[in-house]
Amino acid sequence: MQAKFHSESGFALGRHITLEYYDCASDVLFDKDRVEKVLLSAALESGATIISSSFHQFEPQGVSGVVIIAESHFTVHAWPEYDYAAVDIFTCADNIDLDKAVDSIKTQFSSRRVFISSDQNRGILTPGVKSCIPHSNEKVMERSTLPITWKKVFENSNPWGVSTSVDVYECSSDMIRDLDSIKQFVYGVCEMLGIEKIQNSPVVYYSQNETAAGFSMARSIETSAISGHFSHSTHTAYLDIFSCNTYEPRELAEFALSSFRGRHYRMQVALRQ
């Protein structure tokens, strides 16, 4: 798999994969020099340009290290007691052969199982897309970039629908307690999904216990569904959005962050085939 970053909606600055190597040869993982040799060899075989490397041997065992390449980096954390190594590769050049790197490490670690736990494009979504993140004094800072574009993923897999779960943390207490703010958020999501705005979307307040207290809403329209719970005790918005229309999950997450003046968020995306 070659590292590809460009799309019609913008471009990504790089590609980042994380790999889990199981059932490795423990004698290799015990030895800092051998682990370093494995990563250096994999970087060379992939076509990367090596700048430097730094590896550390922990006591009584364990190795961590990084190979700096002109195109970015290879890193590893090895647990010989579990015959396991975690590797991540970041590259900002499309001439790197990631398949060769993955296979080279697998062979040299004598790993019986390797799993690609994440594969992401990193970089710019589209110039001009803005979002807001509040500082501690509640002032708003504008950002003009988003960290990943999913357009190529959708084009390559052609899913029936896309499901996104977003948890927005440390929201403004006023915003998640305000019905109009919640309704305006739903209208904005509808616009992003390219569907008709939901009028009179039901929002219910739950107060049976302190932990669950907060507003909840759920609504299906056309081939899309929007639901959310806005917890007063945790100051968190828990959101789930599904649609058969193509949309950018991170753009949606950044919109939620801005709408409820959250400090950070976590997001999970599932393609429905």
Image (cartoon, rainbow, N blue to C red):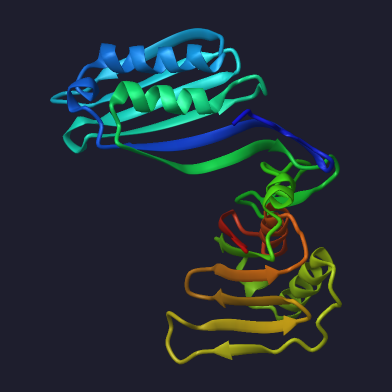
Q: Is residue 16 above or below residue 191?
A: above
Query: Is any atom of residue 154 visible in this view?
Result: yes
Point out the image quarter for the C terminus.
Answer: bottom right
Q: Is residue 234 left or right of residue 182?
A: left
Q: Is residue 94 left or right of residue 33?
A: right
Q: Is residue 122 left or right of residue 77?
A: right
* Count of numbered labels shown in the rendering: 0
Q: Residue furthest bottom?
A: 208
Q: Is residue 102 left or right of residue 167?
A: left
Instruction: Identify which residue is drawn at 27% across, 11% down.
Output: 33
Query: Is any atom of residue 64 visible in this view?
Result: no
Q: Residue furthest left?
A: 60
Rendered image quadrant of residue 106: top left
Image spot of residue 131 (x, y percent):
75, 51
Image spot of residue 20 (x, y percent):
37, 38
Rendered image quadrant of residue 85: top left
Point out the image quarter for the N terminus.
Answer: top right
Image spot of residue 188 (x, y percent):
80, 68
Image spot of residue 255 (x, y percent):
73, 59
Instruction: Identify which residue is drawn at 46% across, 8% down.
Output: 52
The residue nearer to you, when weighing 48 against 252, is 48
Instruction: Identify which residue is drawn at 19% across, 27% down.
Output: 26
Instruction: Identify which residue is drawn at 42% across, 12% down.
Output: 40
Q: Is residue 244 above or below residue 255?
A: below
The residue nearer to you, when weighing 49 against 47, is 47
